[in-house]
Image (cartoon, rainbow, N blue to C red):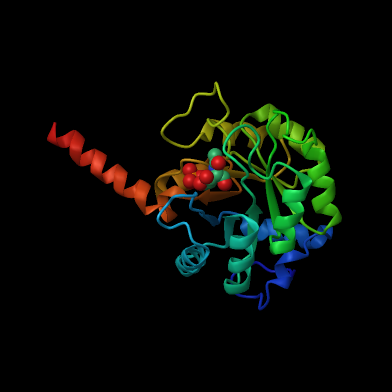
Amino acid sequence: MKPSASLTQDASTQDAYTQVASTQDAAAFVSALRGQLVVSCQAPPGDPLRDTATMVRMARAAQAGGAVAIRANGPDDVAAIAAAVPLPLIGLWKDGDQGVYITPTVRHALAVRAAGAAVVAADATDRPRPDGSTFTEIVEAVHGDGGLVMADISTAEEGIAAQRAGADLLSTTLSGYVPGQHRGSGPDLDLVAELAGATDLPVIAEGRIGTPDQAAEALRRGAHAVVVGTAITAPGAITARFAAALAADAR
Ligand SMILES: CC(=O)N[C@H](C=O)[C@@H](O)[C@H](O)[C@H](O)COP(=O)(O)O
C-alpha cells in the first residue's frame, strides 16, 4: 500500500490496501492506525440489519464520520465493503458462537483475505481450534498471502503467546467472552495497559467501548487504536440501553 499518514485520502483502489506483507508497508499501515478509530460493521444472523448492503452503508457512514479502517465479518461483507469503501479492512469470519469461532481455521482466514481484507483477525486464545490447527498456522498462511494478522485475545498471556506466534497486532476483543471469565459492562482497559507494557506489538482496544470518553481513555492506557462496534453500528442494542434507563427511572 502507499506509505501514508492518511489511510482515508491517498488510496484510490482497494488493491492498495491488501498487499501489506513487506515490512515497510506493514509499518505504514500500523502507523496510520495510531490514535485512530476503527469501526466494526457487523450484524449477527437474525438481526434486522443482517444484510450485506446494510453493512456497506454502515461502513460508508463510518468513513464519513472519520473511521480509518473497517472491521467486518464474513467473505461476503468483506468483499462488498472492499468494493465500495476506500478504507482498509480488518476481516474475520465467524463460524458458530461457541469455542473458537472467530476465523477458526486457515481456510476461513484465506477466504477473508481473498475477499479483500488487509488484516485477518483470528481467535488467539489458548483454546483448541475445531480442526486441530494452530494460530501459528493461520499467521503463516496469511503472511504467505501478503496480509497481516490481528490476534483476538482475552488475557495478557495469550497476547504474549500471539506475539511469539508472529501476530502483527493484538486486540482485546475476547476479554470477558471466554467461559469462566468476568465480563464487565465496560472495556477491559487494564488488559490494554498490561499488554502495552508486556509486548512490543500495537495493542488495539476492542470490546464494550461504549462512549467516546472510554475510547480516548483506551489510548491514554496505551492502546494504539480503538475498535468500536455495538456502540456505533448496533441500533437495537443502543435502543435497549435507552429503554432500560427509562425503565429503571420509572421504578
Ligand atoms: C466477542 C466477539 O465475538 N466480538 C466480535 C468480534 O468481531 C464482535 O461481535 C464485536 O462487535 C466487536 O469485537 C466489537 O466489539 P463491541 O461491539 O463490544 O464494540
Q: Is residue 215 visible?
A: yes
Quarter of the image containing the C terminus?
Answer: top left
Q: Is residue 83 above or below residue 132?
A: below
Q: Is residue 218 above or below residue 21?
A: above
* Number of numbered markers: 0
In this orientation, which residue lies closer to the viewer: 35 or 10? 10
Q: Is residue 219 visible?
A: no
**Left or right: 7, with 210 as reference point:** right
Image point (63%, 32%), residue name = 99
Report x, y in % for residue 220.
52, 43
* Residue 6 falls in image quadrant: bottom right
**Left or right: 14, with 85 as reference point:** right
Q: Which residue is the extreme one toward the bottom?
A: 12
Q: Which residue is the extreme one toward the left?
A: 250
Q: Which residue is the extreme one toward the front?
A: 46
Quarter of the image containing the N terminus?
Answer: bottom right
Image point (52%, 35%), residue name = 189
Image point (16%, 36%), residue name = 249
Q: Is residue 58 above or below residue 166?
A: below
**Left or right: 175, with 164 as reference point:** left
Report x, y in % for residue 11.
66, 75
Image point (54%, 32%), residue name = 177
